Structure formats: structure tokens, C-alpha cells
Image (cartoon, rainbow, N blue to C red):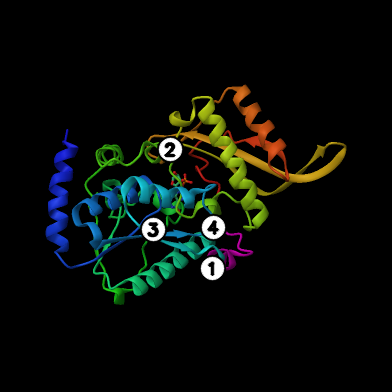
Amino acid sequence: EWDMQSFIDTTVKEIREQVGKDKRVLAAVSGGIDSTTVAALMHRAIGKQLSCVFINHGLLRQDEEKEVVRLFKEHLGIDLIYVNAEKRFLSRLKGVTDPEKKRKIIGDQFAKEFVTVAKKHGPFQWLAQGTLYPDVIESGVSKGPAAVIKTHHNVGGLPKWLKLQVIEPLRFLYKDEVRKVAKLLEVPDELLKRHPFPGPGLAVRIIGAITPEKTRIAKHASKIVEDELKAAGYYDKVWQAYAAVGDDRAVGVLGDERVYGHVVMVRVVESIDAMTADWTRLPYDVIERISNRITNEVEGATWVTYAVSSKPPATIEPQ
Ligand code: XMP
């Protein structure tokens, strides 16, 4: 096995040589493990020559934007360029129901936001990305089936005139190696243990049109799912866990009133690499607590269902 400390030492040297003493690097970060590790590694190598940008598209997990900014500042000592692009994303997504269209719009708006930042804070000569070895293989000749099922968004599609050269310091690593590198770089545990979250965020967990109400329900109910799994000791054992919401409604009672509320779908899966996944056989009492809390605490949610389809034939995200 490759020693990760020597990987860090070698890569830091290589980054310094490649970037040079006066060139600047821009990195888009999401708060996920890959982009955070790239940022930490680049920061160690070139310090202030690195700028990191975090774009909030309004479809993040509850309080995620605050946590990412805090984590970068306090734990990693990296200042973020924080862009609140919520309004611009959500206005373009208004009324859009097709999953692929949502992904295209989000990818396109990301590129636009990124260009704005590059112009405003630039010039930059380099773009740092958290590409891993499996991504390198997947985007090569042998595109796996998963690659074509859904368009995965990344900071692709940037205009050529920006003249950014791409630097990908993790391109020879697998995910478990990235985790080791992250740990050595003192990326905090709360981030290392956090479940993966798709780039388009809640857009792929809100079935049908994205509305403020469905977004609120998905965020709040997902937080309850996460908290209950943590309390029951399941959070660290599963791959992903969240609540999705669509346009299905079902009648509930609130006091002695009839409420025609939303059906919330809870999804908890186990997986090794996200190519296949199995639904988690949660104990009934955990499911019950999740259901009770969602119907009691989330305004407008009247029913809770539990997704019992594995991948394949289903996928991990509903959109
Ligand atoms: P699916 O739904 O295809 O998801 O079974 C497989 C894994 O990929 C994540 N996912 C995405 N990640 N951009 C991302 O960065 C995306 O567009 C995207 N779509 C799905 C999903 O959360 C799961 O871990």
C-alpha cells in the first residue's frame, strides 16, 4: 500500500513546481470530501496563491452553507469566496420538471457563476479539481452504464477564453485513499463522515417542479432522517440517507382538522461505490420515530413512505 504521507509530500512539491511562484489557482469547493481535500492540499502547497469559491445554489442540506464556510475558515484556515446564487438558480429552475433539464440548468448556471468569480477575483491561470482515479477511467473510453443514466454535473463546460489549465492532484487516488489523505491534512471528522451529496443537491430529491414549500419539506425532513440515524447508530453505517418529496399528496389529521399534505419518501441505502446499492433494513422502531417526527414537526407533511427498491433497478436519487 502506498503511504499517504509520502503521497502528500510528493504532491505538494509537484504542485509548487507545476503552478510556479506567481500563478494563481481557483478551486470550486462543495464541502464534500474530494473538493475539500484538494483545497487543503493546494493550500498546503501554495497558500495564498489559492482561492476557493463556494457557490450556494439554494438546494443544499440544512445550514450546509454556514457549516462549509465555518469549516474552511476555522479548521482549515482557508477563506472562501462565498456566492449566494440562490435566486439565480431557482428562477431558472422554476416550473422545470424533467430531471435531465434540471441537471443541465444547474450545470450551466454553475459555469456562469464560476466565470463571474474568475473575472472578478482573477486573473487565474489554473483550475484545481477533485477528479479521482475512477472518474478518470469513467470519462475515458469505457464509459460505465451509470455515466449515461444521469448527467453528472461537475465544473465542466467552462469557456476556453478563461484559459484555465486544469490541475487534478487526486487523479491517481481511490476514495478510501482520499479519506486517508484528508485525515492527515486534518480535515475534520464531521466532514469526513458526512454522507455524499449530489452536486445538483435537492434538485434531484424534489420530484417535479422545485418550489419553496417542497424545498423546505425536503430539507427539514432530511435533517430529521439524519439525526435519527445518528441517534440510532446507523448514520456511519449507511451510504446515504435523506427524505425526498414530490407532488403526491395524502390526507392527514391535525387536531381535528383535515390536512391535504405532502407524502415524504425516506430513502436509506448501503453501497460501496454508488454503482449498486441496497436499501437498508432499518429496525421498525427507527422508521417509526422518523415517521412520527416528520409528520409532527414538518409543516405540510402528512405521510411518510420508506423506499424499498435497490439499485438496480432503481437509482439512489429519484431524479
Ligand atoms: P444515482 O442516483 O445515479 O446516484 O444512483 C449515484 C450516486 O451519485 C450521486 N449523484 C450525483 N453526484 N452530481 C453528483 O455530484 C450529480 O449530478 C449526481 N447525481 C447523483 C448520488 O447522490 C449517489 O451517491
Dot 4: element: loop
Q: Which residue is mark 4?
A: 58
Give coordinates of residue 117: x percent, y percent: 38, 69
Res 293 → quadrant: top right
For the point 43% across and 70% down, the residue is: 112
**Mark 3: C-beta under 8 Å from nearest atom of ligand 1:** yes
Task: Tell me the distance, in whole angstroms, between the alpha carbons under discs 2 and 3.
Answer: 21 Å
Tag 3–tag 1 contact (CB < 8 Å): no
Can residue 9 be seen in the rendering of this structure?
yes
Q: Residue furthest bottom?
A: 161
Give the SS element for disc 1: helix
Mark closest to the chain's N terminus, 3 or 1: 1
Question: Which of the image's four quarters has the N terminus?
Answer: top left
Q: Along the polypeptide, which appears first: circle 2 or circle 3? A: 3
> Mark 4 to mark 1: distance in Å?
9 Å
Q: Which segment is the magenta one?
A: 89-98
Q: Relative to residue 57, is residue 115 depicted above or below?
A: below
**Alpha carbons under labels 4 and 2: distance apart:** 29 Å
Q: Position of residue 165 (x, y in %)?
A: 23, 66
Name the amino acid, label 4: Gly
The span from disc 4 to disc 3 (Cα, nearest Å) is: 17 Å
Residue bearing mark 1: 88
Q: Amino acid at mark 2?
A: Thr
The residue to which callout 2 is attached is 276
Categorize mark 4 by other alpha carbons within 10 Å: few (<14), some (14-19), many (20+): many
Amino acid identity at mark 1: Arg
